[in-house]
Image (spheres, rainbow, N blue to C red):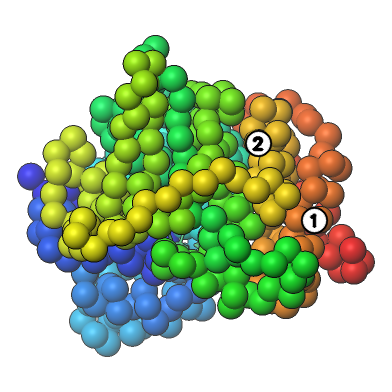
Amino acid sequence: MTQKISILGSTGSIGQSTLDVLRNHPEFEVFALSGHQNVKALSAQCQAFRPRYAVLTDPDDAASTAREFVDLGLDTEVLCGQQALQRIASDPAVDTVMAAIVGGAGLQPTLAAVAAGKKVLLANKESLVMAGGLFMDEVSRSGATLLPIDSEHNAIFQCLGNQLEVSDGVEKILLTGSGGPLLRRDLATLKEVTPDEACAHPNWQMGRKISVDSATMMNKGLELIEACWLFDLNPDQIEIVIHPQSIVHSMVQYRDGSVLAQMGQPDMKTPIAHALAWPDRMESGAQRLDFSTITELRFESIEVSRFPLLDLCRQVAGMDQCYAIALNAANEIAVAAFLEGEITFTQIQLIVEFAVNSTVAIELLSIADVLTVDQQTRALARQRISEGL
Ligand code: NAD
Ligand code: MG
């Protein structure tokens, strides 16, 4: 039977990889796409996949794209704004939702898919970092099927026997990370790192925000928090291991000493195809590993002084949820400011630390409370940047 899919953030790196996988699978029908301000890319995707809906953020963009589609004789209806994202995520006609918007902007549409009981393919790790407790409660309440797309979490899911449940037999999780482009960089020159250097990841092609997060290893820290929620673990059950080749995507260690690893090319088409086909398997279009050419699989422990944000994330993972909201919000503001050339690479850390230290925990009864803490922290971080730190 045909599965109908909505892709939130289809014009991004994960969104494009998802469409690359789907191109060879007519058993999936693209129901809706969304592209924020990427008008041209979204229009081209609509012409190729002919979805029922397309969502842009700006009403003028939506109006001009709708006119373009009329001229092209394309039936796709163009919608705009947050409500529209929630609508395409929860439409009764939809079976599967790929949650691939970057940052906190992905929280509400992803939650709308969860609340509607969809099969949710979760790339947007920020929604679990911001609202893990409320999010997982909603998964239980609605009966949604949650499948991790982040390559590490997808690997752990596979090593747990294709499930989120962690049995008593599991001793610990080994979350691997390449160490990013600055693994060997002279620490004294970190403040001179440019946006292009920070985004030049040695193994993965990704959007710019997550690329900077990989350079600071904030990404691994966010993934630690993500893993705690997804697999219901304490931070001390998760060890982070540097693995520069990005071939082992993560591992699970069992009580008898067995360690199961999932391997593959550093290509997101593999976890995407895994989740799309789950509990079966399907062709992803990713290249295969060639063991006659792999000369080295190396593992190292982390140099903590090089990646202070990773340490902060580990502390925050064991604290009240409000600190994780603040951590994520300040990081988004700081990374955007770094990419705009407003602050240096090493100032990202200062802003995030400042925001976490300034946070006063409140009781989070609803997503509205989460968004309040998020907005307050963003304002605080922006103010700090405009004051020149
Ligand atoms: P990206 O920047 O390439 O794409 C982001 C998508 O979100 C685009 O379609 C963009 O138009 C849309 N978007 C951006 N801001 C928006 C807003 N305010 N409102 C609505 N839509 C908005 O990002 P990406 O690299 O594809 O990452 C997407 C998510 O997947 C992130 O949460 C990231 O952490 C996660 N992830 C990505 C990778 C990867 O390889 N790229 C791997 C693991 C997890
Ligand atoms: Mg990852």
At 64% from the left and 67% from the top, the residue drawn is: 185
Considering the image in quadrants, where does the N terminus appear? Answer: top left
Q: Nearer the viewer, mark 1 or mark 2?
A: 2
Residue drawn where x is 42% and y is 50% of the image: 298
Q: Nearer the viewer, residue 121 or 273?
A: 273
The residue nearer to you, when weighing 167 against 131, is 167
Read off the residue under disc 1.
351
Q: Contact, CB < 8 Å: mark 1 with mark 2?
A: no
Residue 53, percent from left and from top = 31, 63
Q: Which mark is residue 53?
A: none
- Residue 246, percent from left and from top: 39, 55
Q: Measuring from the top left, give residue 342's x and y in whole percent.
A: 77, 75
Mark 1, secondary structure of its residue:
helix
Left/right of residue 273 with respect to residue 341 in the rendered view: left
Residue 318's spot in the image, x, y percent? 67, 27
Q: Label 2: state its secondary structure.
A: helix
Instruction: Tell me the quarter of the picture where residue 216 sits.
Output: bottom right
Residue 156 in view of the camera: yes
Q: Residue at x 37, y 46 (%)?
A: 249
